[in-house]
Image (cartoon, helix red, strand yellow):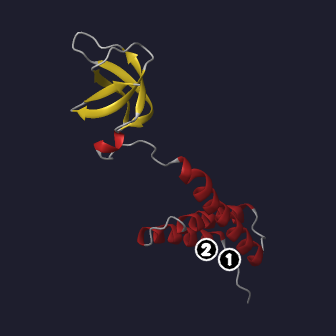
Amino acid sequence: MEFQIEYWHWAVFGMLLMLAEILIPSFTIFWFGLGGLLMSLLLILMPGLGVSSQLVIWVVVSSLFALAWFMVFKPLMKDRTKAGIAREAIVGETGQVIRLPGANGRGRVRFTTPVLGDDEWDFICDQDVSLGDRVAIREMSGNTLIVDKR
């Protein structure tokens, strides 16, 4: 009697691996579970596939999923803001004046990289500034930046 792997074996195996990710949070096992689910679908479409072919396809597809995650998608998801970083870390960041100070003495500055989670901030500057001038953060006062003209 020869053992034949059915599509539902792969489906159960894939789901168990994905559930194992809860206990072992490395986010690697998940991709092998996804490969198992994909192997299940492939076996529905091609029921005569041999066991050795199934294993090779599962290993290759799962490895490609894991490589794609770690080499392509994970780096794209990095948070490039400075949210949650101490206020001292933002000193020296430069931005461009997009609105001149009004009657209240506050203008608006835009940064190319978000500072403390936002790319536009109200600012106060002791010097005269014009639209498009570059300013650097000296300190922070509440929700307003105190800047110096560059």
The one of 115 and 10 positioned closer to us in this rendering: 115
- In this view, 135 is above or below 79: above
Q: Residues within 10 Å of mark 2 (few under 14, many from 20)?
A: some
Quadrant placement of the N terminus: bottom right
- Occupied quadrant, residue 5: bottom right
Say left or right for 133 vs 87. right
The one of 89 and 27 positioned closer to us in this rendering: 89
Res. 5 mark: 1
- Occupied quadrant, residue 113: top left
- In this view, 57 is above or below 76: below
Q: Position of residue 111 (x, y in %)?
A: 43, 29
Q: Position of residue 3 (x, y in %)?
A: 70, 84
Identify the residue under disc 2: 9
Distance Cα–Cα, label 1 vs label 2:
6 Å
Q: Dot 1 lies on which element?
A: loop
Q: Dot 2 lies on which element?
A: helix
* Residue under the point 61% across and 62% down: 66
Q: Position of residue 67 (x, y in %)?
A: 64, 61
Res. 76 mark: none
What amino acid does circle 1 point to? Ile
What amino acid does circle 2 point to? His
| Contact, mark 1 vs mark 2 (Cβ under 8 Å) | yes
> From this viewpoint, which residue is outermost toward the top?
103
* Residue under the point 29% across and 29% down: 145
Say left or right for 34 vs 82. right
Q: Residues within 10 Å of mark 1 (few under 14, many from 20)?
A: some
Quadrant placement of the C terminus: top left
Say left or right for 125 vs 76. left
* Residue under the point 32% across and 27% down: 147
The one of 149 and 72 positioned closer to us in this rendering: 149
* Residue under the point 45% across and 72% down: 24
The one of 111 and 8 positioned closer to us in this rendering: 111
